Image (tube, coloured by chain):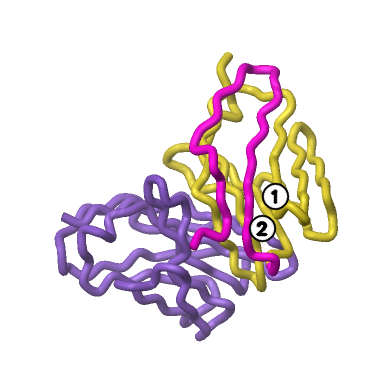
Chain colours: A purple, B yellow
């Protein structure tokens, strides 16, 4: 079964405590991306990766890092989380010959 | 600057009637458009798409229309069902970068 798996699904943390949200896909897709969803703002792209070792900033990259050391994994790193990073985060993958993005189930992050 | 706009935050229709969700875009480089549906506590799921070389694409109860000159697309759901109640996101693609609208909450009343 095609899957995009995110962990953790829910997390409450405190300002400044580094955290990583993992994303793993089993579809062998080259393209992976992170989005955040906020009320009234829709889905905004944080970072994306066209292939292994290739990453680029999306629309709202500040305060985030990513890495793409292998095709199936694309972790999102918050080095020093702040309350304005409280959000619902989605990882997504895509194959180049179609436009369709496959999304994970989301990770709800609260930074106190 | 918002490149993909969904001007209606919410829409309410009766079961069996037509639902029409609208989306406007400003970037003429967009060449592929998609609609996603999102239920609470789930990730968005792909619904239907259309290439810029077409003006209509149909899949069952869902039809997407594209008017390139007006930079406007719409999603028609006929007939609407209560299970269609969800947030619908319009997305536009340029060079493999998808830009999403803010979403429209559709409520289909029994």
The reply to whether callout 1 and callout 2 are in contact (CB within 8 Å) is no
Horizontal side of residue B59 vs B16, given as left or right: right
Secondary element at tag 1: strand
Q: Residues within 10 Å of mark 1 (few under 14, many from 20)?
A: some
Identify the residue position indicated by label 2 in the image. A100
Q: Count residues near mark 2 (Cα–Cα under 10 Å), then give few for <14, some for 14-19, many for 20+.
A: many
Q: Nearer the viewer, residue B2 or A95?
A: B2
In this rendering, the answer to whether A22 lies above or below A39 is below
Q: Quadrant of residue B15?
A: top right
Residue at disc 2, secondary structure: loop
Residue positioned most to the top: B110
Task: Report the residue at 25% width, 74% height from top.
Answer: A79
Q: Is residue B31 left or right of residue A103?
A: right
Specify the quadrant of the image occupied by residue B52. Answer: bottom right
Range of residues picked out in magenta:
B1-29
Q: Residue at x 56, y 51 (%)?
A: B5
Q: Could you tell me residue A47's position as x and y percent?
A: 45, 72
* A68 in relation to B61, above or below: below
The residue indicated by pointer 1 is B72
Please check the rendered image and state whether residue A2 is part of the magenta-colored stretch, yes or no.
no
Mark 1 or mark 2: which is in front? 1
Q: Is residue B50 above or below residue A33?
A: above
- Tell whether position B14 is magenta: yes
């Amino acid at each position: 079964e095609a899957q995009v798996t995110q962990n953790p699904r829910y997390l409450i943390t405190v300002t400044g405590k580094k955290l990583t949200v993992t994303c793993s896909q089993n579809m062998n897709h080259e393209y992976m991306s992170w989005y955040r969803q906020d009320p009234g703002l829709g889905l905004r792209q944080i970072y994306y990766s066209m292939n292994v070792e290739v990453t680029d900033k999306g629309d709202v990259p500040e305060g985030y890092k990513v890495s793409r050391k292998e095709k199936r994994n694309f972790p999102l790193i918050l080095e020093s989380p702040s309350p304005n990073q409280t959000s619902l985060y989605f990882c997504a993958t895509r194959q180049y010959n179609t436009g369709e993005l496959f999304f994970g189930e989301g990770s709800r992050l609260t930074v106190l | 600057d918002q490149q993909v706009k969904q001007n209606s935050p919410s829409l309410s229709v009766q079961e069996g009637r037509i639902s029409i969700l609208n989306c406007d875009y400003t970037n003429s480089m967009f060449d592929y458009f998609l609609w996603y549906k999102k239920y609470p506590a789930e990730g968005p799921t792909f619904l239907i798409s259309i290439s810029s070389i077409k003006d209509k694409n149909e899949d069952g109860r869902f039809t997407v229309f594209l008017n390139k000159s007006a930079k406007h697309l719409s999603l028609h759901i006929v007939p609407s069902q209560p299970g269609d109640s969800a947030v619908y996101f319009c997305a536009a693609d340029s060079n493999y970068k998808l830009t999403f609208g803010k979403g429209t909450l559709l409520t289909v009343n029994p």
